[in-house]
Image (cartoon, grey):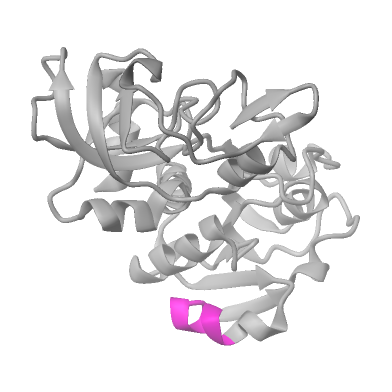
Amino acid sequence: VNKDENGYKTSITELAEESLSQGNVSVKVLYSTLNYKDALAITGKAPVVRSFPMIPGVDFSGIVEHSESEEFKVGDKVLLNGFGVGEKHMGGLSQKAKVNSDWLIPLPEAISPLQAMSIGTAGYTAMLCIQALEKSGISPQSGKILVTGATGGVGSFAVKLLALMGYSVVASTGSSKQHDYLYDLGATEIIDREELSTPGKPLMKEKWAGAIDSIGSHTLANVCASIQYGGAVAACGLAQGMDLPATVAPFILRGVSLLGVDSVMRPRADRVAAWK
């Protein structure tokens, strides 16, 4: 991806290895994946790319070809999510990548490089959200868990993972054609997103023990207002908007916790735990 006075230009180009960003580990990229952020980078629809030229791709899996780090040796299988890769550091849509060793984690033995990129940032973020809820005391016995944006990447993985872990999952979607898909993933109940997407009251009927929200704005405000006493909401997205037109009522009257979940700069220990 490059940019000049005429705007963004995207092309498939051969680059010398010296053109890659600096890093103490060189990786032969086996697989990458396309995220929403990659689409923004490629199309120029939003200014996610911080320097040019740039190779997009916020995720990749591969094999270490050269290492100046004691943490990784040649032949190790690794994966990477985030850390500005594909935005300000050459990314994974390439045959090779140079990155800092502390951005990488070992590829779990139970997951192949292809499977890792089939999961990608979406599945990784979904698990971070689930772990945030669990750290807040939420368990399958706590009650139903709402997932907004349930047919999206994070939402779909969240529904599937929660169901596999024994949770009763309520999925929110705007597409009636996707109901069978959500039930197949493990949802036990489906609601229309219109129930949450318009301005609501500061406090509403207590419905869910917890929630994973990738929507933001009025949806997140209404979700918080509908969480049971002592429940929690893991927020990781802004599909509806960056605003949060809410009051403090759910937090000071019901003890609800709003948990921000970032996947880009997450500490390695959290990454390793999520990928297990």
**Residue at horizontal 59 percent and vertical 80 percent from the top:** 189
Residue drawn at the location 8% of the way across and 34% of the way down: 75
Residue at (77, 30) in percent of width and height:
7
As displayed, is residue 38 above or below residue 71? below
- Which one is nearer the viewer's eye here, 21 or 186? 21
The answer to whether residue 236 of the structure is visible from this angle is no
Verify whether residue 66 appears in magenta.
Answer: no
Return the residue nearer the eye: 154 or 79: 79
Q: Where does the magenta region start and end?
A: 180-187
**Rendered location of residue 146, percent (x, y):** 59, 64
Q: Position of residue 259 (x, y in %)?
A: 57, 38
Q: Is residue 147 above or below residue 136?
A: below
* Quarter occupied by residue 195: bottom right
Q: Position of residue 24 (x, y in %)?
A: 25, 14
Residue visible at 62% across and 20% down in the picture: 50
Q: Relative to residue 170, is residue 199 drawn left or right? A: right
Residue 123 position within the rendered picture, expressed as x and y whole percent measured from the top left: 42, 54
Q: Is residue 108 above or below residue 9?
A: below
